[in-house]
Image (tube, rainbow, N blue to C red):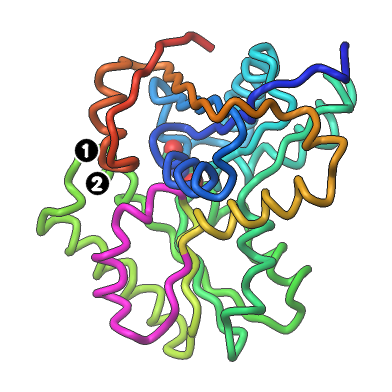
Amino acid sequence: MNSSAQGAIGVFDSGYGGLTILKSICQELPEYDYIYLGDNARAPYGTRSFDVVYRFTLEAVRYLFDQGCRLVILACNTASAKALRTIQQNDLPGIDPSRRVLGVIRPTVEALSEVSHNGQIGVLGTPGTINSGSYDIEIEKFNPGFKTYSQACPMWVPLVENRESDNPGADYFVDKYIGELFSKSPDIDTVILGCTHYPILLHQITRAVNGRATVLSQGNIVARSLADYLQRHPEIREQCSTGGKCQYLTTENPDKFADLAKIFLQQDITVNHINL
Ligand code: DGL
């Protein structure tokens, strides 16, 4: 393979959630080209098994590589938790060792020491992310002594994807999961939104947390971490094309994607359909 080629930065999510990450990345690094891929036809990933999330994610990464991407961001905590390490360690060396796949969990965890005062961390995520234990492992690795309290929020992604986030049903489920999280420890001072869909519920979550903790969205954290990564890795930076363009792909209906994407991006976009 030609390692001197350039390509867009691939941004992958099971559906719409990764758009919250893409938006921040485009604000931080507007000069690069991006290809966003949402596997909406097979979302949600949050309740799927390890094997399935790994297989779907690898298919998406391979597709983005075929489009010329040299660097792919898994803008999905579930995929980062269940597929990233295997892809990095087992698949990439055989596919093309000069390409990179990065996730969203490590940058989030690395930012914790700047935010938390008492090391009591709450993590909200899909059942897949929470059951994987990835946040607990990474938090322990980067911040020994921190204590992690996790809460799966299985209803939140469907609420967002079904445009119910501003309705009373959403308040009910936000109060329920935030209540369950703080019942594990009233001393939590930092709450990680460990799912890229959750910033759409930020207003409701902040209301329910009610000043007890800092609520951490991942968009800006991941964007700053990517900027830093590209700074430290000129050999990868030089493989990223700089046309300032963003292309949107979905495995579902492109009109439906464009319509719901407005909630995430506050802009009209053109979307193309692909099959994985
Ligand atoms: N946006 C994904 C995440 O960050 C989850 C959505 C899904 O369940 O597919 O975990």
169 in relation to 95, above or below: below
Q: Quadrant of the N terminus?
A: top right
State whether residue 47 appears in this view. Answer: no
User: What type is the residue that disc 2 sits on?
Assistant: Leu
Check residue 136 for magenta coloring. no
Residue identifier under label 2: 159
Q: Are marks 1 and 2 in contact (CB under 8 Å)?
A: yes
Residue identifier under label 1: 162
Are there few (<14), some (14-19), or many (20+) residues within 10 Å of tag 2? many
Check residue 211 for magenta coloring. yes
Say which residue appears at 71% left-offset and 31% top-offset. 71
Rendered image quadrant of residue 252: top left
The foreground one among 252 and 265 is 265
* Whole-percent x, y for residue 121 in the image: 55, 77
In the structure shown, which secondary structural element does the residue marked by tag 1 occupy?
loop
Rendered image quadrant of residue 11: top right
Q: CA distance from mark 1 to mark 2?
A: 5 Å
Q: Is residue 234 left or right of residue 205?
A: right
Numbered range of the magenta stretch:
196-216
* Whole-percent x, y for residue 115 in the image: 57, 79
230 in relation to 203, above or below: above
User: What type is the residue that disc 1 sits on?
Assistant: Asn
In the structure shown, which secondary structural element does the residue marked by tag 2 occupy?
helix
Say which residue appears at 26% left-offset and 17% top-offset. 255
